[in-house]
Each structure stands twice: as C-alpha cells, then as structure tokens.
Amino acid sequence: ERLKNDLGKKGRISRMQIGTFHSICLQFLQDQGMEFSIVEEWEALEIAEKVLEEVGIKRKASSFLKDVSRRKAGEKEVKELPEEAFQAYHRVLMERKLLDFDDLLLTTLSLLQEDKQGKIKSKQFSYLLVDEFQDINQVQYKLIKMWNQGGKELFVIGDPDQAIYGFRGSHGACFEKLQEDFTNLIRISLVDNYRSTPQILSAALPLISNNKGIERRMEAVRKEAP
C-alpha cells in the first residue's frame, strides 16, 4: 500500500513482485501446475501424533514439529529427531498432497536446482531487495542466490545484532557468508540512531561490540533524556 501511494501508477506496481519467501514460492509452485494444499496446524499435529505413536516415541507432537522444521530449515543434525519419524511424517504429507511452510521453500529450491536445461520458467529478479536479512535460514539464503542468477543487482538490509531467530535456523553470520559469495559487495553501515536516547546507546554499544564481525558504531540523533 505504501509503494502504491508513493509510485502512484498501477503499471509500475504490476511489474514488481512484493512478498514473503513463502508467498513467492507458493505462487511459483502454483504457476508450475503443482496440485497441493497447505497443511493446517491442527492437521500437522494430528499427523505428528499418529507418526509418533507408530514409531513408538513418547513426546509432544508440537515439539516434534519444531524439530522437523529445524531439520528442513537446514540444520543437518537434530539429535532429538529420529530419522524414521522424520521420514514417516514426510511420507504422510506426500501421500495426502500436503506441503508445510518449509516445504514451500524446499520444493521451490529443488525444482530450480534440478532445472539444468532451463525448461522451467524460473523466478529470477533483475533487481532483488531482501529486508530483515539477518532472519533468513540456509534454505532462504540458497533461494536468494538462485533468484539473483543473471540479475543486475542484489540489495539486502539487516542487522546482525538483531538475529534472534536462531531456533528457526537464522544466524547473523549470513552477512559474512554474503561477503564471501559476492566479493564485489559494498557494505553501507547506517550508524545514525533515531529511536534511542544516548543513554540507551551507551549501555548497548559495549554489549553488542562483543559480537563477531565489523566494529559496531551507533550515534544518537535524539538528545539526552532529562
């Protein structure tokens, strides 16, 4: 809505695609003619409970599903998740033509990677902007690289010190990974802070300066609090 208001013309918006990773992948899979439904939360819990009962594992279905998501997000070893149970859960989803949110990303990535001859009209962007980059997981990082192939420009914005979704597979080190993969990358640090008072920044800076990466700098625009 903000872009529509700023750009003013519907034609300009129609040439843009704006969405989350999941919404873009959902549209892509539908464009490929795939027939599937998104598994509902209650349905996923029901399937998980049956699978756990069949393989003889006593644990909460909700906890099991969190481990399944961690595995699909790129964590190679999830000790709490037996392979038998993981494969059984995945098999039931496939039999019912169901995809969970992680599957939307994984299936899209798999199709793009397997398309060696370029038969699929893959989703690629001339100009790709990724917001909240610190929140991406390994699968999302691979998707960004696939979407950017042949693109003119990739722009990401984020803050490694706000990477708080490690339980979902994200990590602030994604910025260093990007620097390794794109050696001509230009980093622009936004050091002016418009939100916090100098007192808050003076307390926060010594803490986040212990994090890995480049030197942390923050300059307060607001005046000292009384």
Image: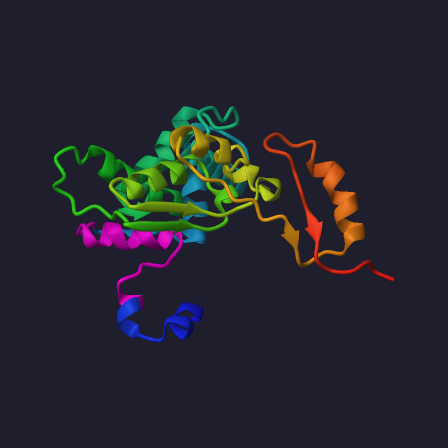
Residue 131 location in percent, x, y?
Answer: 46, 51
Residue 192 is one of the magenta-drawn residues: no
Residue 70 location in percent, x, y?
Answer: 47, 35
Residue lying at the far right in this picture: please name it.
Answer: 226
* Residue 181 located left or right of residue 189: left
The part of the chain drawn in magenta is 13-34
Identify the residue at image location x=44%, y=25%: 76
Q: Can residue 109 be seen by looking at this rendering?
A: yes
Residue 66 location in percent, x, y?
Answer: 50, 39
Identify the residue at image location x=20%, y=54%: 31
Identify the residue at image location x=18%, y=50%: 32
Camera-nearest residue between 20 and 179: 179
Q: In which quarter of the image is the C terminus?
A: bottom right
* Residue 131 located left or right of residue 119: right
Corner quadrant of residue 211: top right
Residue 206 location in percent, x, y?
Answer: 75, 37
Corner quadrant of residue 149: top left
* Above or below, comparing residue 40 to residue 95 in the picture: below
